[in-house]
Amino acid sequence: MFKKGTKAYSIFNMKCPRCHEGDLFPTGSFSFNKPFDMPETCPKCGQKYFLGPGFYYGAMFISYIITGFFCLFVVGGLILFAGLSINAAFMVLLVVIAILFVWFFRISRAIWININVRYNANALSDK
Ligand SMILES: [Zn+2]
């Protein structure tokens, strides 16, 4: 969907921001097996995933923004276009959020580390 070497590729495939090869998370987003575990470093190029103490604090703000807009669009869309009542729309939202919760958490971390780490096409060779 996105070309390797772009930030979008790394974010949506949840790959290491430096080499775009190693996975940011050891398990699949919808496996619910160790959903919040991340390796210390990239398994392919050795890029650190934890750049400092409390590094992912910033990801919380991204998560907040994404989740906030997502909820607005889901509830707004269900009420305006699907004709649901407010209560019904919120029930649907709760289910959707419960399913996507881990994915939101991970995509926020992926965006955050991509803001802080640049892609390096030679990352694997000059390890
Ligand atoms: Zn890497």
Image: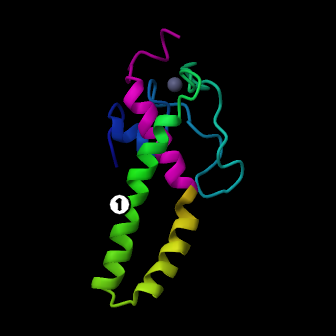
In the rendered image, residue 51, in percent from the top left (x then y), is placed at 53, 21
Which residue is located at x 38 percent, y 24 percent? 119
Helix, strand or loop at mark 1: helix
Task: Please state if 116 lies on the left or on the right of 102 as rendered.
Answer: left
In magenta, the rendered stretch is 102-127
Looking at this view, is 6 or 79 the one in front?
79
**Where, by quadrant of the figure, is residue 95 drawn?**
bottom right
Vertical relation: 85 (above or below) 66: below
Task: Please state if 5 lies on the left or on the right of 34 as rendered.
Answer: left
In the rendered image, residue 54, in percent from the top left (x then y), is placed at 57, 29
Looking at this view, is 123 or 50 the one in front?
50
Which residue is located at x 33 percent, y 69 percent? 73
Q: Which amino acid does label 1 sit on?
A: Phe
**Where, by quadrant of the figure, is residue 37 drawn?**
top right
Task: Please state if 102 lies on the left or on the right of 64 as rendered.
Answer: right
In the rendered image, residue 124, in percent from the top left (x then y), is placed at 49, 17
Looking at this view, is 114 or 9 the one in front?
114
Q: Does the magenta stretch include residue 115?
A: yes
Task: Please state if 123 lies on the left or on the right of 81 as rendered.
Answer: right
Which residue is located at x 38 percent, y 89 percent? 84
Which residue is located at x 47 percent, y 40 percent? 59
In the rendered image, residue 118, in percent from the top left (x then y), is placed at 37, 23
Vertical relation: 73 (above or below) 26: below
Mark 1 beta carbon near ligand 1 (under 8 Å): no
Vertical relation: 27 (above or below) 19: below
Badge 1, how many Cα within 10 Å: few under 14, some, many 20+?
Answer: few
Q: Mark 1 points at which residue?
A: 69
Q: Residue furthest left?
A: 80
Number of numbered discs on residues: 1
Q: What's the coloring here?
A: rainbow
